[in-house]
Amino acid sequence: MEPSTSQTEMLARHRAVIPNWVALYYEHPISIVRGEGCYVFDGDGKRYLDFFGGILTTIAGHGIPEIQEAIRAQTEKIAHLSTVYLCEPMVELAEKIASLSGIEGAKVFFTTSGTEATDTALLLSSLYRQSNQVLAVRNSYHGRSFTAQAITGNRSWSSTSFAGLQVNFVNAARRRGVPFACFEEDEFRAASVADLRDVIATATAGDVACFIAEPIQGVGGFTYAPNGLLGDFKEVLDEYGILFVSDEVQTGWGRTGENFWGYQAHNLTPDVITFAKGVANGLPLGGVITRPEIMDCLKANSISTFGGNPIACAAALATIKYLEDNDLQTNSLKMGDRLSHGLQSIADDHPWIAEVRGKGLMQALETENPDTYEPLTAATSAFHEETKQRGLLVGKGGLWGNSMRITPPLSVTEDQIDQAIEIFADAADAVADKL
Ligand SMILES: Cc1ncc(COP(=O)(O)O)c(C=O)c1O
């Protein structure tokens, strides 16, 4: 369906003043004006099931009364005070997050985005270790700043490596289309650990600052290391004193269903955790969690004017309470299972859907030509369009843009999952007719 004049005009205004590299989804991008639970509404009043949540961010759902009330109450008291004054919501949130982190005696520094959290983790690790060397994972994404770009392992998201870091990328997460793809899980684990050792021995000076990994790669299309592999890595890293940074920007707060944090699938305790996205259900908040000796190794003054903003912190406290009170991690596990089964049955009918993968409500489909194993980037875009036309919003991703990312709020119901599966099935049939 063609968009209305008002949506077309909005697109023209957007294109005139917003950078070209801020990509918009869909042939006819939509302007979203309202959200309610698991649904959003566009400027023409059309309703969509929101199975991307503003990139995994509205984790509890849109317009949750308990969270809205916390935001309203804090707004009526004070909107901003900066970090040079004591801020009770910030301290209370830091206490809560530290207690959830699994890191003993943890301290928390708040930022306004995941990128700044990445930057801070790199800053602290390099100061603590007095090293500019970093190990990252191939196919990774950790943000858009100068330093975060230097540790990006995904060509379509990597704009420059100019930052003054010496970065090496190791194999851990991507399982299809890589040299280790032929290996069974145990062999893959052993080969990846051997490769890590080899990279440290041959490409670094040994005194690497940190290794940073997403327990499930977000932009990378929800690819992930076999359970336990990152724990194997941690044992090697510990031999050198290399810090382990777990980027939990997408995988935190129970999203994966099986665990509260993604790292918990790997039998390790990270030295540093970064978080953002879902923590405040859409208000801008991110941060870094680490042990006092790492956090306090920074000896200059350092602040974030907006980091730890009281409204964002009040929203985060209410979001975490809502997730806990409603046991949404368990819902993520159950609904993720239902979603994954539904998607798998569609994939069974469509050989070009090569893989369904994910944990909890972080599920992806990857497409591939079944004869040549080439990624089907155009077909994935068509699939994405077909789902939108039928009233379902999901994300895209993967190294070759051939994955769909499906991440409803953790409050999603069985009925909503079933509606989405029906839409996926119809959309897949429509794509198959054109292949
Ligand atoms: C794993 C991961 N880390 C960091 C970031 C950067 O977060 P932000 O976009 O809030 O700066 C992202 C964003 O998508 C991400 O997926």
Image (spheres, helix red, strand yellow):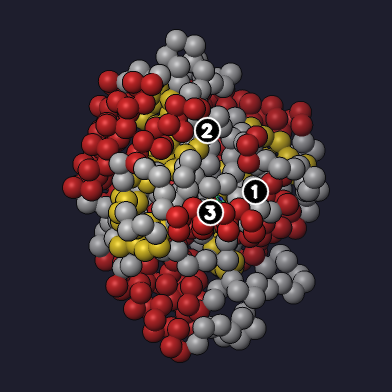
Determine whether the residue tagged by mark 1 lies in a helix, strand or loop.
Answer: loop
Q: Nearer the viewer, mark 3 or mark 2?
A: 3
Give, as a three-letter code, the residue at label 1: Asn
**Residue at point 23%, 48% (across, down):** 416
Q: Nearer the viewer, residue 11 or 183?
A: 11
Task: Please identify the quarter of the rendering in which residue 405 is found.
Answer: top left
Q: Nearer the viewer, mark 1 or mark 2?
A: 1
Give percent across and percent down for residue 46: 32, 54
Q: Nearer the viewer, mark 1 or mark 3?
A: 3
Q: Residues within 10 Å of mark 3 (few under 14, many from 20)?
A: some
Q: Which mark is residue 401?
A: 2
Residue at image mark 1:
20
Determine whether the residue tagged by mark 2 lies in a helix, strand or loop.
Answer: loop
Give the spatial CA distance, label 3 vs label 2. Answer: 23 Å
Q: Which mark is residue 296?
A: none
Q: Which mark is residue 11?
A: 3
Q: Is residue 31 left or right of residue 157?
A: left
Give percent across and percent down for residue 23: 57, 46
Give, as a three-letter code, the residue at label 3: Leu
**Residue at point 59%, 30% (across, down):** 171
Give the spatial CA distance, label 1 vs label 3. Answer: 12 Å
Q: Is residue 179 left or right of residue 161?
A: left
Give, as a three-letter code, the residue at label 2: Gly
